């Protein structure tokens, strides 16, 4: 029993960052109809910004985190403006190819700049974990969960409570009519891509200190993000948030009770099951954001 | 107020408008009637900037808006109530109305206009927190009209507001559009229901394959033998 609780606690912590990854990807797909193959690299970039800020520049850990988010935001805005805006109105295959190319180029650039050796981000938290009864959780992981929950809540508030969020939802449901209402749909695309990218970078910045940072770390994260988005239904933010936690629970229980070698396979088993039995996602009453 | 001169625009290799010229005077309700595919909707989409002109000019209050973005055109005071209602289905009624006032910043004015829309359409007030997609067709059309008026436009473009509605609701719809004109807002109305539009309007244009072929008062068009045969069922 205590083992199960420990697994579920671990899943909860992992799930928060998975939810961030999934929400970022599903927003971009839902509003822009772009399959974002740079999402994983943005996750890696978030981790490297964190590494640079903390290990190289000696910045405070808690200051470095928002810097990493900001880095993702800016890089996302640049990618959208330079690579996606010229292809506005092109079909989804075209932008998909552009994004695959951009992802490969960016990952190679990271390898070139930082080398292939894994980097560790020093954490300011005490080594001894928090012990509650039979369950032990490291302070760093608690911070990861807290930060992820704050960002998920912030994203919800932005989508449902602000003028930008209103315009994003309108553009998602009917871009032409949103333009007739005065929405600058090009700006909405930039804002959406930047926001989705910043969430990926935030996830990388949170998990980077938990694991280690390598140029390839985003590849698996991206595949997991796709699994979460398929699970939650394309463009469904709530679905992606819940999907992130479901994937984490599946991974933790799979690793704990089946075989730890199958941890990363769980996401793909879920994708297969969802595509066979509920191809529109688990929560697809109506596809929506918000 | 609105002058369209020799407007040509189209999609791909086809020109939907082939040299269209129209004038809308301030305070008038102008009807644009014609068959399906004659270019009525394209005209409205060109005015509001959703379709780019290939040649010709559109001027509003003396300013050239031919190449302007939709939000600039709305900012100049032209609202567009699109064909098929196009309410945001997963947003509430209140959020749809908020979208209509998206460019406005005067909170008090927006709130007052929203109450005016609710006063005009009590059904919308009852359903203000309901998703617009759950409304009936007639209610959605009322919402689309209310949403267009939330921009406080000087000119409002209505594209087929009677399409797909029950006869008693169609009647109400035309009464509402007449009331919009009577309240001082200029109206350009596109309709397949030619008779009702011609009865209501101050001035009318008949469009055929992308060109204006006839213009005059509504009565004059109703009396025209060609219009009678082709559009009013003999």
Image (tube, coloured by chain):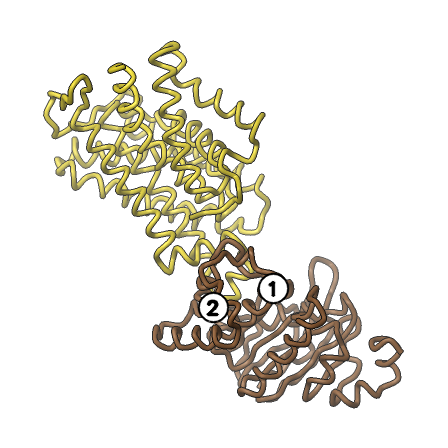
Chain colours: A yellow, B brown
Judge from the rendering whether residue A107 lies leftward or rightward of residue B216; answer left or right. Answer: left
Identify the secondary structure beneath mark 1. loop
- Is residue A178 left or right of A254 when viewed as pictured? right
Position above or below: A90 against A105 = below
Question: How far apart in space, not on screen, are marks 2 and 1 (Cα)?
Answer: 18 Å
Residue A166, numbered label:
none
Residue B8 location (% of width, % of height): 69, 71
SS under mark 2: helix
Give me the residue at 63% from left, 69% from top: B53
- Residue B59, by quadrant, is bottom right
Mark 2 closeness class: few <14, some 14–19, many ≥20 residues within 10 Å? some
* Mark nearer the N terminus (2 vs 1): 1
- The chain containing the residue under callout 2 comes to B
* Quadrant for the N terminus of chain A in the image: top left
Q: Which residue is mark 2?
A: B125
Give the image location of residue A51, x and y in percent. Answer: 22, 31
Image point 38% across, 73% down: which residue?
Answer: B111
The structure residue drawn at horizontal position 58% and vertical position 65%, both measured from the top left corner, is B139
Residue B211 left/right relative to A290: right
- Residue denoted by label 1: B85
**Do callouts 2 and 1 point to residues on the same chain?**
yes
Q: Residues within 10 Å of mark 1 (few under 14, many from 20)?
A: many
Placement of A25 over or under A5, stated as above or below: below
Question: Looking at the image, which residue is at 53% across and 23% down?
Answer: A273
Please provide percent x and percent y for residue A229. Answer: 46, 35
Total numbered badges shown on the rendered structure? 2
> Where residue B163 sits in the image (x, y, percent)?
69, 66
Left/right placement of residue A217 relative to residue A283 reads left
> Of tags 2 and 1, which is closer to the observer?
2
């Amino acid at each position: 029993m205590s083992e199960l609780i420990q697994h579920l606690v671990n899943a909860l912590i992992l799930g928060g960052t998975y939810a961030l990854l999934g929400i970022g990807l599903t927003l971009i797909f839902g509003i822009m109809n772009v399959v974002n193959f740079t999402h994983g690299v943005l996750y890696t970039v978030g981790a490297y910004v964190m590494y640079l800020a903390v290990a190289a520049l000696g910045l405070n850990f808690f200051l470095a985190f928002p810097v990493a988010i900001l880095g993702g935001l800016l890089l996302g805005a640049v990618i959208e403006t330079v690579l996606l805006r010229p292809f506005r109105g092109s079909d989804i295959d075209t932008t998909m190819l552009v994004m695959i190319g951009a992802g490969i180029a960016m990952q190679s650039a990271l390898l070139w700049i930082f080398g292939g050796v894994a980097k560790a981000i020093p954490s300011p938290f005490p080594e001894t974990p928090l012990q509650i009864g039979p369950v032990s959780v490291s302070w760093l992981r608690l911070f990861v969960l807290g930060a992820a929950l704050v960002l998920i809540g912030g994203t919800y508030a932005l989508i449902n409570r602000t003028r930008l969020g209103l315009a994003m939802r309108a553009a998602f449901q009917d871009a032409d009519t949103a333009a007739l209402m005065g929405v600058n749909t090009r700006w909405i695309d930039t804002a959406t891509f930047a926001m989705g990218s910043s969430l990926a970078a935030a996830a990388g910045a949170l998990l980077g200190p938990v694991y280690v940072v390598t140029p390839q770390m985003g590849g698996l994260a991206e595949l997991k993000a796709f699994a979460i988005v398929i699970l939650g239904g394309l463009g469904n933010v709530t679905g992606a948030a819940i999907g992130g936690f479901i994937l984490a629970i599946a991974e933790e229980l799979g690793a704990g009770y089946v075989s730890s070698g199958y941890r990363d396979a769980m996401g793909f088993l879920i994708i297969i099951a969802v595509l066979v039995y509920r191809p529109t996602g688990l929560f697809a009453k109506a596809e929506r954001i918000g | 107020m609105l002058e369209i001169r020799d407007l040509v625009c189209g999609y791909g290799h086809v020109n939907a408008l082939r040299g269209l010229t129209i004038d809308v005077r301030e305070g008038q309700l102008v009807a644009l009637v014609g068959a399906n595919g004659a270019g009525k909707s394209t005209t409205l989409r060109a005015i509001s900037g959703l379709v780019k002109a290939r040649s010709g000019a559109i001027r509003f209050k003396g300013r050239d808006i031919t190449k302007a973005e939709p939000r600039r055109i709305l900012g100049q005071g032209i609202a567009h109530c699109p064909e098929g209602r196009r309410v945001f289905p997963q947003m509430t009624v209140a959020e749809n109305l908020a979208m209509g006032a998206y460019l406005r910043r005067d909170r008090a004015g927006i709130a007052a206009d929203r109450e005016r829309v609710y006063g005009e359409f009590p059904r919308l007030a009852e359903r203000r927190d309901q998703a617009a997609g759950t409304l009936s067709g007639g209610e959605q059309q009322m919402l689309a009209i209310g949403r267009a008026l939330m921009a406080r436009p000087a000119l409002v473009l209505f594209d087929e507001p009677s399409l797909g509605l029950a006869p008693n609701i169609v009647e109400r719809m035309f009464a509402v559009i007449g009331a919009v004109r009577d309240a001082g807002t200029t109206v350009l109305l596109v309709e397949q229901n030619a008779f009702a539009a011609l009865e209501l309007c101050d001035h009318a244009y008949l469009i055929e394959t992308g060109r204006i072929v006839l213009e005059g008062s509504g009565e004059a068009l109703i009396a025209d033998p060609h219009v009678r045969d082709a559009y009013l069922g003999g």
